[in-house]
Image: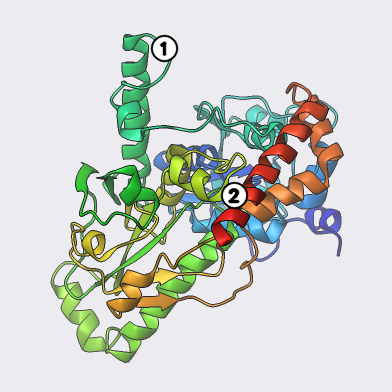
């Protein structure tokens, strides 16, 4: 069946027994999932007890909005990974349908305070609004799919953050001191909210910053313990849990990153299975001491903008460290995030983390950085390096996503024009070509 036929056929499966006030519905395209999407889901989840997320098909988005960058399967993977989501619903109608939300037992529909229209220019939420089953939450400022596509097409670097800690303290930026302080406070509060648990109401993940020299953060020439500082203390490793470490740029956080993280959890669950973690006695013991939990505590290190741009060049990362960090923070497979983590996790760094030396350091197949040395030589020498092999979304990374945009430049430029974004033009194309040539020459010199 086509996407249209699946939507017209109505929601699949047996209808919910009743419509529940606490079961919330939210829907959208969720094209290369960003922290603005997660922010809407967080606010929606805080309004109830469960969150059902309708995901529109590629065909309906093309008809009403323009081409998608990510496939339906990739977009569903991103939605399912959000810690505040109870269930995703594919092929949800572009114009939100009362029969669909009622079928799933959802009383209210939530959307941001921006206007969403269908291909006829009519409000996509007109039917649920008329029924009194619509609630509004605040749209997350300064982030949208349109913004991100613009960064790729215009090849800009103005989104880079030089020092995240200084930005949060109100010490970086071109505004007045009072404006910088207010913005820093708002950004900090958003980080605390994204660190909440699956209810969106209690502390969840912990957030850390690592401070060291640029040589220690971005290269292999210096080995420093650095300084770990805490923004918020969420969950801590429980008795028996293995603390494992993953790191990366996590740019345009997508199904490639998500599936890697899911495979890390799966690998650790296999170790737990082999060691008796899921035996009846072990489960009863954990429950008797307060509640059951999984066998692994995952810590994610996120590299800063300067480090990523040093290695990838052009205008990577497309998302700055704040945006990328929030994307990682909202992911259900993560327990703690370290902002400003080193590109090369050295022995000094790994043995100095707040949790001690991790039991394993995992790396996956999604990197496309041109390397002149092995950044994982330390965990390999320590015997804690583990590798995740190829998987369904192995090839999905920031580089591939940018190429998808560039291959269909004309379509996306038209989409930007409709959205009121300034034209791209030949100048931006020449700028990208120049940056790519500079990066090519740099890699050639390094290789030599």
Percent position of residue 50, x then y: 45, 51
Q: Please rate how many residues cluster around mark 2, counting C-alpha atoms within 10 Å: few if below 14, some from 14 to 19, many from 20.
A: some
**Residue that extends furthest to the front in the rendered view of this protein:** 448
- Asked where in the image residue 405 lies, by quadrant, the reply is top right
Q: Are marks 2 and 1 in contact (CB under 8 Å)?
A: no
Percent position of residue 113, x then y: 57, 24
User: In terms of depth relative to the viewer, which is nearer, 79 or 8?
Assistant: 79
Between disc 2 and disc 1, the foreground one is 2
**Which residue is found at the position 21% from the left and 68% from the top?**
357
- Asked where in the image residue 7 lies, by quadrant, the reply is bottom right
| Left or right relative to 41: residue 336 | left
Percent position of residue 200, x then y: 36, 44
**Residue that extends furthest to the left in the rendered view of this protein:** 289
Which tag, 2 or 1, sits closer to the chain's start? 1
| Left or right relative to 336: residue 101 | right
Can you tell which mark lies on residue 442? 2
Can you tell which mark lies on residue 440? none
| Left or right relative to 104: residue 349 | left
| Left or right relative to 92: residue 45 | left
Of helix, strand and loop, which one carries label 2? helix
| Circle 1 residue | 175
Whether residue 384 is visible to the viewer of this picture, yes or no, is no
């Amino acid at each position: 069946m086509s996407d249209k036929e699946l939507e017209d056929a109505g929601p699949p499966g047996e209808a919910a027994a009743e419509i529940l006030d606490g079961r919330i519905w939210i829907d959208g395209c969720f094209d290369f999932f960003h922290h603005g999407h997660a922010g809407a889901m967080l606010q929606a989840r805080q309004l109830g007890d469960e969150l059902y997320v309708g995901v529109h098909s590629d065909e309906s988005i093309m008809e009403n909005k323009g081409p998608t960058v990510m496939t339906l399967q990739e977009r569903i993977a991103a939605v399912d990974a959000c810690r505040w989501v109870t269930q995703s619903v594919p092929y949800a109608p572009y114009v939100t349908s009362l029969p669909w939300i009622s079928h799933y037992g959802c009383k209210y529909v939530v959307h941001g305070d921006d206007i969403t229209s269908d291909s006829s220019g009519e409000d996509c939420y007109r039917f649920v609004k008329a029924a009194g089953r619509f609630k509004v939450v605040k749209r997350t400022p300064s982030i949208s799919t349109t913004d991100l596509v613009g960064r790729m097409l215009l090849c800009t670097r103005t989104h880079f953050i030089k020092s995240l800690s200084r930005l949060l303290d109100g010490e970086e930026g071109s505004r007045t001191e009072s404006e910088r302080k207010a913005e820093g406070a708002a950004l900090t509060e958003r980080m605390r909210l994204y660190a909440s648990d699956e209810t969106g109401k209690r502390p969840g993940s912990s957030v850390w910053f690592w401070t060291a020299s640029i040589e220690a953060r971005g290269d292999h020439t210096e080995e420093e313990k650095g300084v770990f500082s805490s923004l918020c203390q969420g969950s801590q490793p429980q008795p028996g849990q293995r603390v494992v470490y993953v790191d990366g740029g996590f740019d345009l956080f997508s199904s490639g990153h998500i599936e890697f993280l899911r495979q890390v959890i799966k690998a650790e669950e296999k170790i737990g299975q082999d060691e008796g973690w899921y035996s009846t006695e072990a489960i009863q013991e954990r429950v008797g001491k307060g509640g059951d939990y999984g066998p692994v505590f995952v810590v994610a290190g996120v590299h800063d903008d300067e480090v990523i741009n040093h290695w990838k060049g052009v205008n990577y990362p497309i998302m700055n460290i704040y945006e990328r960090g929030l994307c990682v923070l909202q992911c259900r497979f993560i327990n703690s995030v370290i902002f400003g983590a080193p590109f090369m996790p050295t022995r000094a760094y790994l043995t100095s983390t707040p949790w001690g030396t991790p039991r394993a350091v995992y790396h996956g197949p999604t990197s496309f950085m041109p390397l002149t040395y092995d950044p994982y030589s330390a965990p390999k020498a320590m015997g804690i390096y583990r590798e995740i092999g190829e998987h369904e979304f192995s090839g999905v990374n920031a580089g591939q996503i940018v190429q998808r945009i560039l291959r269909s430049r004309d379509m996306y430029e038209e989409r930007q024009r409709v959205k009121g974004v300034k034209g791209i033009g030949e100048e931006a194309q020449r700028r990208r070509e120049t940056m790519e040539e500079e990066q090519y020459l740099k890699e050639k010199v390094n290789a030599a």
